Amino acid sequence: MATQKKNILNRLYVFFGFLTLFFIAIILKLTNIQYVEGEKYRNLSEKRTIKNDTIHANRGNIYADDGSLLATSMSRYEIRMDASKPEDNAVFEENIQGLSVALSKMLGKTPDYFVRLIRKARNRKPIPNKYLLIARNIGYLDYQKMKTFPIFNLGMYKGGFIANQSTKREHPLGKIAERTIGYDDYRGAPGIEGAYKKYLRGKLGWRLKQRISQGQWKPINDSNELEPQDGRDIVTTINVNIQDIAHHSLLRKLEYYQAEHGCVVVMETKTGEIKAISNLGRGSNGKYYEKRNYAIWESHEPGSAFKVMSMVAALELQAIDTSTVVDTGNGRYRMYGRYINDSHRGGYGKISAARALEVSSNIGFARLIDEKFNKNPNRFINQLKKMHLNKPLGLPLKGEGIPEIPAPGDKKWSKNALPSIAYGYNLRLTPLQTLTFYNAIANDGKMVKPRLVKAIKSWDQKVMAFEQEVIDSKICSQQTVDKVKVMLKNVVVRGTAEKLYSKEFSMAGKTGTARTEYWMDDWEENKRYISSFTGYFPADNPKYSCIVVIHKPNLEKGYYGADVSGPVFKDIAQKIYTDAPLLKEIENIEPQFTTVDKDFDKYNNFSDRKLKTIPNVKGMVGMDAISLLENLGLKVKTTGNGKVKNQSIKKGERLKKGTVIKLELT
């Protein structure tokens, strides 16, 4: 019995011993957690309940050359309310109606709607969603105004006003030049936005937030722990007016010819500043938008546009002169086993090298270059390379196409390579690379690098300025430049672009019509062309150079460069002339024109009389007619440009002030 009792006691001692050790272990562990590893676990706890919420800085603005906004960051706010605030119910009841009325005026819904919404959220026990959504996508000015509303003006803790800020990138011009302005987000970083993102992004700020019920995060303090620093601004060379002209001129022709895509670049001759760049491609819905930056990215066979480069190289090497005669035959010539054709049926026969450029004879250039350089093709190719035609422009924007000019020994070289290159095949250039060469001709041989950005600014202070960058001070002799300028002018006066000629303003350039995808099996059944026009204006003292390239127009409507791309060039040149006339081209500042004098006398006769009936303004210059009718108290609306063709109110009808009269100008 005693032995059994002793065994029981021993077991109890052992049990209590283990129990004591267990409690000691717990105490030690708690002590370790509290004092030894306490900081670690506190940090883990804070990470789960407290976080640093990043506040993105406003990106810098992107401006046009006149200060117009091309891209800007707009602050947007999501407004929520902690409906349990204020804790003093009397304050809540006193101000709920005033808050609801203010919200109604701003957001459009009735005051009763907001009263019911806020009361319902406040009376819900327990509150499953503590933050009541008031509004999304609120602008900065509305956000500032909302902070002054009753209850909200008490702040976050006493009034329950919660604002979550975000930024949104806006393009005031909409889709115009969208690809060149670019973006910097999940889609990538093309254009100016991507190239200058380190300047535009600024520095991030942060704000402490605490996790509350239902997985929501609430700011701990009224202010940010670290304020974000806005990014710097970019001033571009883009001219808003010229950009608008180029965009819509290109769009109209793309729509008419149902083309696949196209691009336009307008560049200032002396500086290389790009004043307009438009890139439009057709989507699946048939609408055109900026899909790719074709002007910079897309390298392709330039076709006849390259004949100018061939001419410059041959003249510079003194292999030919403008008077050198070449036999183009009847428009079809067999060379190294394949036929070369001219667009003109029956051919041009024997013509000079200058005339070969004016009429864009493929046979003429193939024969001229092959006969002069077939024994030493490297001499011709090296001259092209000397003029930088084989090198990228080195633009800051990513995605520039790589030029390709094969030489003897390359995979693409064959007996046909040299004559093919002569008239623009078997090589590749981007539209902007082609334009840079033409611009050098317009600039008396000085090749300048195309430039899209003028300066980087912080507020009103320039941080960095980008000056003109010269690629080559003289790509060829002045004698060669002068000869080529005359030929390019004659292309418009009497060559392939003669239908573009206008006495009102002068321009010079070269048409281009190139086959594309001609190596594909279906080409004979489904022919595809690239139409282009490259040149400058005015012809004698060039201020702007321009290239227009349109891919795969509808063949039933036309595909030659003079028909498809040339009119876009002319439209742009004409409208720039209209907006910015070149005064130094006017020889007589007091011209005597009979028609002008008659219009002037007609206007004075009307204005001197006190008319009581509607006058006849047909045949008057639009601006004179508008001035006359408005002085009579009429409201004038016009369509078109030029002289008055029709007027909506007939001559002799009773004149009533304030009446709207419509004029059709032509």
Image (tube, helix red, strand yellow):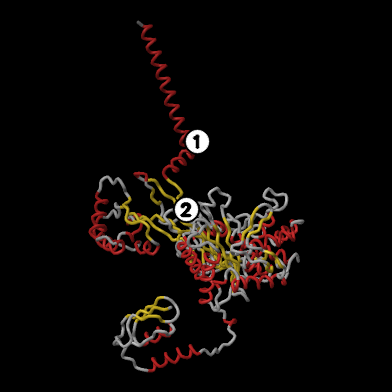
Q: Quadrant of the N terminus?
A: top left
Residue lying at 48% horizontally and 33% vertically, measured from the top left = 32
Question: Where does residue 561 sit, x and y in percent of width and height?
Answer: 55, 64
Q: For the residue carrying disc 2, how many other residues have a C-alpha within 10 Å: few (<14), some (14-19), or many (20+)?
A: some
Residue 45 lies, with reference to residue 428, above or below; the image says: above
Image quarter of residue 158: bottom left
Give me the disc on residue 656. none
Question: Where does residue 456 sit, x and y in percent of width and height?
Answer: 57, 64
Q: For the residue carrying disc 1, how many other residues have a C-alpha within 10 Å: few (<14), some (14-19), or many (20+)?
A: few
Residue 142 lies, with reference to residue 588, above or below; the image says: above
Residue lying at 54% horizontally and 51% vertically, measured from the top left = 523
Q: Amino acid at mark 1?
A: Val
Residue lying at 35% horizontally and 61% vertically, measured from the top left = 147
Question: Does residue 323 appear left or right of residue 535 in this picture?
Answer: right
The one nearer the camera, 553 or 70, is 553
Give me the disc on residue 206. 2
According to the picture, the residue beneath numbered tag 1 turns out to be 36
Q: Residue 220, can we see it?
A: yes
Residue lying at 40% horizontally and 52% vertically, measured from the top left = 219
Q: Amino acid at mark 2?
A: Trp
